[in-house]
């Protein structure tokens, strides 16, 4: 019963201490945005383009030019990294994705964490680095980062890391994500993670 009460309270808890979106430096829609926005990027400024529909040659050239005009825009940098990865220019993709992540762009933080976790070329093969970037994205409100982070946390994959979150804080992050989820299966997964985290905390 105690575990159930904790889960229910967490699901309906509204967070006041969690920072939401790391906002892009510019909301102006560019041709790079139109060609390279990711449909699941919460900070995109126009309709996203599925990976199989991206015009790679045009998108890479356009985003590169736009980034030269707006070098301080992490959204454009992330999109340039995205299409560079799709086009096979992996070195550019890694460098630009990390720069966008370090500039605070939460979608880039989430994706760079995936690069690290999947041991892609050119990135540290250290799960603690993925922990760092996923947690930044999770605290910034990236829902998928919260799910991914919780999965690794609950499975002990961060056991060798100095994790930057307490169980109670993670519970709040998951509760917020569950309240925002629009997909039935994602909501069910988040609710399950909350139950597992509560059980783990009460051991």
Image (cartoon, grey):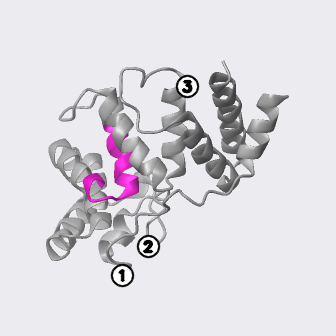
Find the distance from the CA under tag 1 to the CA under tag 3. 40 Å
Give the mark, 2 or 1, whose residue is nearer the N terminus.
Answer: 1
Observer-nearest residue: 20 or 94?
Answer: 20
Q: Mark 1 and mark 2 in contact (Cβ < 8 Å)?
A: yes
Residue 153 placement (x, y as % from top left): 50, 28
Mark drawn on residue 154: 3
Q: Secondary structure at mark 3?
A: helix
Question: Measuring 35% from the left and 43% from the top, which residue is drawn there?
Answer: 133
Residue of label 1: 28
User: How far apart are labels 3 and 2 at the CA level?
Assistant: 34 Å
Q: Position of residue 93 (x, y in %)?
A: 22, 48
Determine whether, in the image, residue 172 is placed left or right of residue 128. Answer: right
Q: Which residue is mark 2?
A: 45
Magenta span: chief secondary structure: helix
| Residue 100 at x, y percent in the picture | 27, 57
Choose top left, top right, bottom left or bottom right for residue 124.
top left
Q: Which residues are magenta?
A: 101-115
Q: Name the one closer to the observer, 86 or 145.
A: 145
Disc number placed over residue 19 in the picture, else none: none
Residue plotted at (63% across, 52% down):
176
Q: Quadrant of the N terminus?
A: top right
Res. 115 image quadrant: top left
Q: Please tell me whether residue 158 is drawn above or below residue 182 in the rendered image.
A: above
The answer to whether residue 68 is above or below residue 187 is below
Tell which of 17 and 177 is nearer to you.
Answer: 17
Answer whether residue 170 is visible to the viewer in this image.
Answer: yes
Q: Which mark sits nearer the N-terminus, 1 or 3?
A: 1
């Amino acid at each position: 019963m105690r575990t159930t009460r904790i889960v229910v309270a967490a699901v309906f808890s509204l967070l006041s201490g969690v920072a939401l979106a790391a906002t892009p430096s510019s909301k102006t829609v560019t041709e790079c945005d139109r060609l390279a926005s990711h449909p699941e990027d919460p900070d995109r400024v126009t309709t996203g383009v599925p990976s199989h529909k991206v015009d790679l040659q045009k998108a890479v050239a356009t985003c590169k030019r736009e980034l030269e005009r707006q070098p301080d825009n992490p959204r454009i940098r992330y999109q340039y990294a995205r299409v560079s990865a799709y086009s096979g220019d992996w070195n550019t993709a890694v460098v630009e994705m990390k720069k966008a992540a370090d500039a605070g762009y939460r979608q880039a933080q989430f994706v760079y964490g995936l690069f690290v976790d999947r041991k892609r070329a050119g990135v540290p093969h250290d799960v603690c680095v993925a922990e760092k970037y996923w947690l930044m994205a999770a605290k910034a409100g990236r829902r998928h980062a919260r799910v991914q982070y919780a999965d690794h946390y609950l499975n002990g994959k961060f056991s060798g890391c100095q994790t930057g979150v307490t169980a109670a804080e993670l519970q709040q992050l998951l509760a917020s994500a569950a309240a925002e989820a629009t997909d039935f299966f994602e909501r069910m997964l988040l609710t399950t993670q909350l139950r597992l985290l509560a059980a783990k905390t009460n051991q």
